[in-house]
Image (cartoon, grey):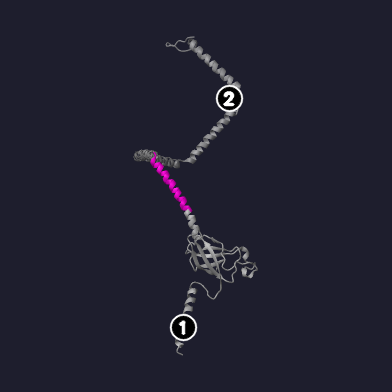
Amino acid sequence: MQYAREIKVGALATICLFLLFFGFNFLKGVNIFSPTNSYHGVFTNLHGLEEQAAVYIRGHKVGQVDRIHYDFTRDSAFTIDISINKDIALTPGTQMALVSDGLLGGMAIELQLPSSSLGAEGASLSEANHSVIAHGSFLPTTFVPGLFDSLQGELLAHVDEAVQDVDSLIASLRSQMEGDHLKSTLTNVDRISGDLSLVSSYLKRMMNNQVPRIVNNADTAVANLNTVVADIKAADLKATVARVDNAVDNVNGLITDVRSQDGTLGQLIYNKSLYNHIDATVVSADSLLVDLKAHPKRYVHFSLFGKKDK
């Protein structure tokens, strides 16, 4: 009975150490009651991978990174140890990929199984009759860039192109500044500015002198046009049109009479004998006038004393 207290203290300390060990591994994500298989991989760059990082297969967590060994005397300086659930069998061709874990930039390990590692029902290889990779083997490794890595690469490429364009632009500007192109350009700009000043002053004088006169003339023309329109409105257009129609009818009647052979004008135009008689009469009258001028004494007239001459 004298050792009962010491036994109790020892048992309590053992239980506390066990709970501490279990709690520490639980916080690290290690289930000490679940058997695991260990595998190894070699990387040249871990991109921020840390111990206790998750190990996934098709997005499902199956283990964790137990330890990271490094030897900077070699190109492949990092060797990592992972442990996965013992009931998962890896087939030859499985790769250990370093992938991005979430948007916060963490890294994880993704075990990329070959396409033949799943049966028709999607069962794991432990349920199929295939060869498996032995416990403690080294797996081939690869790196899968994440979203930020891809964006960073594309952004750097665009930034590089932009920097090259800016360099070309600066070089072009420098060549323009060093040569005579800038002086000639400034001279042309000065000349254009002078021409614009002259044109502006001319336009200003025109606006002050000619535009008011043009506006007054336009107002006068508009007033006259309004007067003409008012006169046209006041005029008896119907009566005028009726008189014009009557005059046209009279002209048409006159033309009809001329064309007809029954009227006087028609007889004069179309009757040849009448024309001949009139022509003969005119000839006779002309002869009479000639003879009258030549022999005026042949015709009877009264003298001053009332005597007749033959």
Q: Secondary structure at mark 2?
A: helix
What is the quadrant of residue 304 in the picture? top left
> Which mark, by number, is residue 10?
1
Q: Is residue 22 left or right of residue 179?
A: right
Q: Residue at x 52, y 14 (%)?
A: 288
Residue at label 2? Answer: 269
In front of the other: 253 or 274: 253
Query: What is the magenta segment's predominant secondary structure?
Result: helix
Q: Secondary structure at mark 1?
A: helix
User: Whole-percent x and y of residue 120?
Assistant: 65, 67
In front of the other: 270 or 184: 184
Question: Disc 2 marks which amino acid?
Answer: Ile
Q: Residue at x 49, y 74 (%)?
A: 25
Confirm whether residue 123 shows in the render.
Answer: no
Q: Residue at x 56, y 19 (%)?
A: 279
User: Whole-percent x and y of residue 67?
Assistant: 50, 68
Front of the two marks 2 and 1: 1
Q: Is residue 195 left or right of residue 11?
A: left
Confirm whether residue 240 shows in the render.
Answer: yes
Q: What span is in magenta?
A: 157-179
